[in-house]
Amino acid sequence: MTVFDDRTTAAMWPAAYPQGYAVVDVETTGLARDDRIVSAAVYRLDARGNVEDHWYTLVNPERDPGPVWIHGLTSDVLEGAPLFPEIAAEFAARLDGRVLVAHNAMFDWQMIAREYARAESAAPVRQRLCTIALAKELSLPLPNHKLESLAAHFGVVQQRAHNALDDARVLAEAFRPSLHAAAERNVRLPLLECRPLTEWASGPTQPRIGHQSSYRAGSWRPSRKRPPCPYPNPGRYESDKPLKQGMRVAFSGDTSVDRELLEDRTVEAGLHVATSVSRLTSLLVTNDPDAATSKTVKAKSFGTPVVDEAAYTQLLRDVTPADG
């Protein structure tokens, strides 16, 4: 691991780099348009990536907490937590005038922007930086794009995965050497514009667990040819256990996250994207298991496990390496 000294980088620090960052992590009830934040954490960093302070809060989502087995926050724990409008001002103060930094920043930004839109306000964020995109710009030799891999590369120890405060801490500690490596090479940071939502159509206040309300009609597209998965198929997915590299995953129906992006994340995690369902299929991902599609019908006949998109995306965050 390379250690960077501020004294040696002062002369080479790009003048165009931002003057401050807000490293953010949010845990949520799911991924759909009507899902909510259940906890949020912010580490404020100066222009060189040094930690200034940190902040954490639980948030009452006013609905089912979603994948408790991932974030560990039950309805009982969240019952007495503040509502988002009650923490919106403090959250905004932590973000104000800074670049939002997150691992898969588009997701965190969209969830934050939607919460502020519901509160009839806007987050004071104009730019975001995704640490996955930065790792790609730096050509870091990572086995995948999971936070734990980025952390391991820089020798950062995770203590509580999927805890917003610890995930934000881990990312802040991994971001600083990434930022210094970019400055040393004069790499242009992959900054993207953050556009606040200007409208919000309230969804149901109590959506069923995993229900995705943002389906896009007519979103069928032909499957993209992908290289073969390098790992052997370990068999079917078992409930309450993590996914394992080599598993064959099929998708059916509309998804709230762009299907191609979802499949890309599947491949990056070391899983095989299956274009059809067979006895070898490890898992079927669908938001409408009762639809009479060929894949859902076959999945039922073969006894193939089925999960919805929200649960699957959470599972993608902790894929077990293939054997030997």
Image (spheres, grey):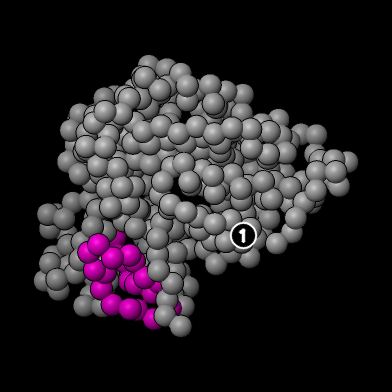
When the figure is inspected, residue 116 is found, relative to residue 219, above or below; the finding is above
Residue sitting farthest toward the top: 120
Q: Quadrant of residue 58?
A: top left
The residue lying at 12 percent from left, 67 percent from top is 300
The residue lying at 40 percent from left, 64 percent from top is 319
The residue lying at 20 percent from left, 29 percent from top is 205
- Can residue 148 be seen here? The reply is yes
When the figure is inspected, residue 84 is found, relative to residue 14, above or below; the finding is above
Foreground of the two, 75 or 308: 75
Q: Tell me where the magenta segment starts and ends, as one range.
A: 231-256
Provide residue 154's location: percent of width, then percent of height: 63, 58
Foreground of the two, 24 or 230: 24
Q: Give the left or right position of residue 47, taking residue 61 as reference.
A: right
Provide residue 321's location: percent of width, then percent of height: 43, 72
- Can residue 186 be seen here? The reply is no
Q: Quadrant of residue 37?
A: top left
Say which residue label 1 marks. 155
Provide residue 8's location: percent of width, then percent of height: 86, 47
Q: Quadrant of the N terminus?
A: bottom right
Mark 1, secondary structure of its residue: loop
Q: Amino acid at mark 1?
A: Gly
Is residue 272 rendered magenta in the image? Answer: no
Main SS class of the magenta portion in the image: loop
Provide residue 258's location: percent of width, then percent of height: 39, 48
Q: Residues within 10 Å of mark 1 (few under 14, many from 20)?
A: few
